[in-house]
Amino acid sequence: MGKFNASLRTLGDSRGVPATVTVVEERISIEAGDQEIGSWNIDEVVLEPTGESVYRLEVDGDRILIDFEDAGTFRDLLDSRSRMRSRIKLRGNRPKKPTEPKPAKAKSGPGPKTKEPKAKPKRSVAVTGAPAAVSSKKTAGRLDAVLTAAEEKWGGLLPSWVFTKGTLTVLLIMVAAAFFVPNIVSLVLLIAGLLTVMFGAVVYTDTMLATRWLPGRMTPMHVLLFGVLVVLLGVLLGVIA
C-alpha cells in the first residue's frame, strides 16, 4: 500500500490541482480534496514517466499528468509490483518434465528381410539471385532499426503512424516530386500546413480535446509550430520554383 501527494493537470496546462494518489494491492485511486477523481485496476491504466517526477496516466481515452512530490518511492512501488508479478508468472509456467517413452520389446524369431531402397543421389541446384535477396533483407533490417530508434526517441511527441515505412515512402516520393513538379508540392505543403495550424488552434483553445487527440507529450504549441514550419517550407519551395 502507498499514499502519495501529487498535483494533477491536463496536457498544455502549467497549473495543477493538489491531489492524493493511493495504491492498494491491484488498484490505484486519485482524490482531489474530498472528491474522488476515480479508482481503477492498475492493469486498466497506462502509466508512462515523462520526466523526473511527472507521470502520464491514460485511462478510457483520457490523459492527465501527475506530478509526484516523492516520485522515487512511487517508482519503487511500481517496480516491486512488476517483479512480484513476473515471479508468480514464472512459477506458474514451469514446464513439466517430458515422460520418456518405454522401449518396445523386440519380437522373437527371424523376420522376413526387406530390401532397403537405394537412395538416389541429390542433384545440386544452383540458386540465382541469392546475394540480392540477402542485401534486400539487410537493408530492410537496417530501416526497421532506424525507425525503431526514432520511435524510442520521439515516440512521446509524435503518433505511432509517423514511424512506419508507409510514411517514409510518402516523404521520399514528395522529395523526389519536388525536383520535377515543385509547384504542386508547394501547394500540397501550404494546404497541409494551414490545416495543421487550424487543428493546433482548435486544441489550443480546448484542453479536453488536446488530452483526447494529442499523443504522448505533444502539446498544442508543438502542433502550431509544426504547421507554421510546413507553411514556410511550402512558401520557400514556391519561391524557388
Image: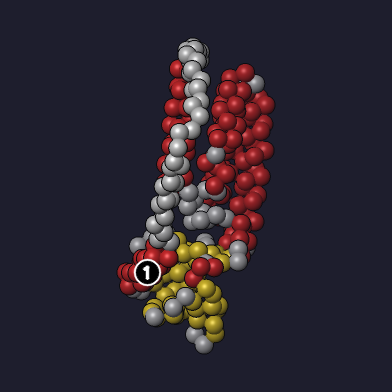
Residue depicted at 55% across the width and 48% down the height: 159
**In this picture, residue 83 sits left or right of residue 143:** left
Relative to residue 17, is residue 93 depicted above or below? above
Q: How many labels does the image show?
A: 1
Residue 82: quadrant of the picture = bottom left
Q: Which residue lies furthest to the front in this view?
A: 109
Q: Mark 1 points at which residue?
A: 84
Dot 1, crowdedness within 10 Å: few (<14), some or many (≥20)?
A: few
By what rule are the colours in the image chosen? secondary structure
Name the residue nearer the viewer: 50 or 121. 121
- Which residue shows up at 43% across the image and 46% down it? 105
Q: Which amino acid does label 1 sit on?
A: Met
Using the rendered image of the protein, determine whether residue 176 is visible from the camera's viewpoint.
yes
Tell me what residue is drawn at x 46 percent, y 42 percent: 107
Using the image as rendered, state which of residue 112 and residue 207 is in the foreground.
Answer: 112
Between 12 and 20, which is closer to the camera in this rendering? 20
Q: Can you give x and y, in whole percent of width and height, for residue 194 in the image?
A: 65, 43
Q: Quadrant of the C terminus?
A: top right
**Residue 89 placement (x, y as % from top left):** 42, 64
**In screen coordinates, is 185 left or right of 46?**
right
Position of residue 55 in the picture relative to residue 204 (left or right): left
Q: What element carries label 1?
A: helix
In this view, the residue farthest toward the bottom is 34
- At 50% from the left edge and 81% from the top edge, which residue is drawn? 31
Q: Where is residue 211 in the image (x, y as percent from the top left)?
A: 57, 62
The N terminus - image quarter: bottom left
